[in-house]
Amino acid sequence: MTAVVAGASVAGVRTAQALRREGFADDIVLIGAEPDVPYDKPPLSKAALAGTTTIDAIALLTHDDAKQLGVELRLGVPASGLDVPNRRVQLADGTSVGYDQVILATGTRARPSPWEAGSRLHLLRTASDCARLRADMQGAGSILVIGAGFIGSEVAATATKLGLSVTMVDPLPIPMSRIVGAEMGELLASVHDGYDVDRRFGLGVDQVTDDGDQLSVQLTDGSQVRADLAVVGIGVVPNTEWLEDSGLAIDNGVMCDEFCRAEGRTDVFAAGDVARWLHLRHGEHRRVEHWTHACEQAAAVARNICHSDELRAYDPVDYVWSDQYDWRIQMVGHTAEDSTPEIVGDISTGRCAAVYAGPAGELTGAVTVSWPKAMLAVRRQLTAGGATASDALAQIHKLAAPVG
């Protein structure tokens, strides 16, 4: 048998590794669009951008690793099509690779900037993006970050450490409120205030022009911001165009069943950012763009390929983190925009936690800021199931109590 993994980011690499752990003894081919060996992407907005680590240091799978694992690497030539009836992955160089099982792990790309302003305007998704942005930041004094999600916030934090003056723009008055609600969203936004970041929230960008010396950015309230360069972080787009003629169901990702198999197929799986699978607990198809999810889904896919007679539904507890300045922000489970969590601690003292409850008081999720023990406690309760928000709060208050 041959298992072909299309996509060499974390979901693809972890799937290949998990296949071996599950006992898959036949051929594995890992296809990657970029010429570099597979590398981890979270550091691109942090340590790699700051220059405190290198791309080699964040490699997920070196050539030696691949050889020891028995994985054939096909790098620098992206998958361009999927011939489902004949079980072949077509590559951009005109060649193709046959498969018995194929795993679609082509991930996402940065949503294109709606503005054109030459080389001063950056996206950040790949190692080459990171290298270009870092080179420009080294000679700059100011930077505009458009989009205050995790990527934008991490870039802003890195830029301040490098001594740049930072302005952040986002059309939402409280950018993270869509995920964590207004109260906790404002607390997370306030993290930037201690680092002299100029927050322009609740404003959009009308126009970006390069006047030769700097970028001139006109905001929706008529004001202008000038900066040496800008980073646009306004979301991502799943890489599914290469599958348009495959006959697979594509709708904001590859539509999959609860076992991560492409709908109607037993020989096509998907993992990571590109997969939109049926989450039985939520009763709907979901696509999740988190590093931890990509690793866990890769393991689930490998298990279901190797144990097709005992398929197991993929039922994760969502978890995501973001390192900003000297803070670690962690989220677990389901946090709702319209909910009002109970908050323990005070961010001004260095740590806090927000606990979210469902209609019956059941524990649904939590957000912590620089409080890893509180996050670990809630993750354990969510994973075990059956906990109430009161249970979680009791545990966190116990952690907060002074020793002795």
Image (cartoon, rainbow, N blue to C red):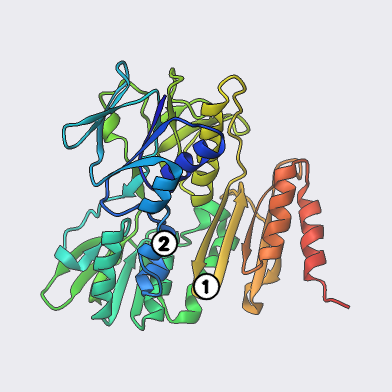
Report the disc number at residue 125: none
Q: Where is residue 250 in the image (x, y as percent from the top left)?
A: 36, 28
Q: Where is residue 274 in the image (x, y as percent from the top left)?
A: 40, 39
Front residue of 368/8: it is 8
Front residue of 23/230: it is 23
Q: Name the residue under label 1.
A: 191
Residue drawn at the location 31% of the way across and 56% of the way down: 126
Q: In which quarter of the image is residue 240?
A: top left
Q: What residue type is labelled 1?
A: Val
Q: Mark 2 points at which residue?
A: 58
Q: How crowded is mark 1: few (under 14 residues within 10 Å), some or many (20 or more)?
A: some
Q: Position of residue 151 (x, y in %)?
A: 41, 61
Which quadrant holds the C terminus? bottom right
Residue found at the very far right of the displayed protein: 404
Q: Quadrant of residue 89?
A: top left
Residue drawn at the location 58% of the way across and 29% of the way down: 283
Front residue of 64/289: it is 64
Q: How far apart are marks 2 and 1 (CA)?
A: 27 Å
Horizontal side of residue 266 vs 348, given as left or right: left
Residue drawn at the location 29% of the way across and 17% of the way down: 86
